[in-house]
Image (tube, rainbow, N blue to C red):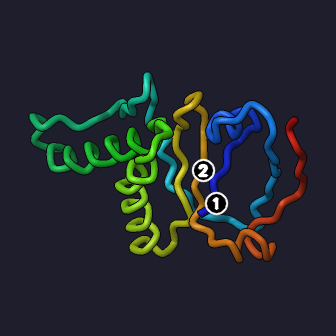
Amino acid sequence: MFYGSDDIKTCMIEIDKKNDCSIGKWEILEDIMVYDLTYKFFYSKGQYFYKNFPSIFDKDRRNYYHDYKFILDFASDICRKVIKNRDENIDYVPTQIVIEYFKLTIKSLNGISFFGAGNGQKNYCLFLNKKQCLDGSLIKMIDSFYVK
C-alpha cells in the first residue's frame, strides 16, 4: 500500500514525527478511482458523520441504514489514532481486512481517501505494491527532501 497526504504537515503528524524524516512529493500519472470517505461526510472529534444518514424509520431509505452504518464505523476506525504499544499491529487488522476486501472485490478501485487521525486532514491509501511505487508506471516521485 502507498500512504500519502495533501500536505507535509499532515504527513508528519500521521507518522508521528516532528523532524528527522524523509518526505517525497509524488505525481499520479493516470486517472485512478479512489473511494472518497471525505466526500459528503464530515469528521469531528474522531468520528465520521453523514449529513443525510438514512433513518430506520424512513420506509423509503431504511434498507440503506446498515450499509451507511458500516461505512461510517469503518471510516471512524481507519482514522482513529493508534496508540503505540505492543498491540498496535493488532489494532490495524480490522481496517486492513476491509481495505483488502475492497481491493479484491472492486477491481476498478485504486484506493481510498479519509480524514487523518492527527489533524482531520485528507489522507490517501492507494492499492499499490512496492514495484508499482518504484517503476514509475502509475506514480512517480518528483521531489524529496529531509526534515531535520
Q: Identify the element where label 1 is drawn.
A: strand
Task: Please tell me which residue is depicted at 43% across the width and 59% down the height of the picture.
Answer: 96
Q: On screen, 134 above or below 121?
A: below
- Which of these two is toward me, 5 or 23? 23
Q: Is residue 76 left or right of residue 114?
A: left
Q: On screen, 107 above or below 64?
A: below
Which residue is identified by label 1? 2
Q: Quadrant of the C terminus?
A: top right
Question: x%, y% of residue 10?
Answer: 68, 35
Q: Is residue 41 left or right of residue 33?
A: left
Task: Please tell me which residue is depicted at 43% across the width and 22% down the height of the picture.
Answer: 45
Three-letter residue code for mark 1: Phe
- Which of these two is toward me, 42 or 101? 101
Which residue is identified by label 2? 124
Q: Quadrant of the N terminus?
A: bottom right
Q: Identify the element where label 2 is drawn.
A: strand
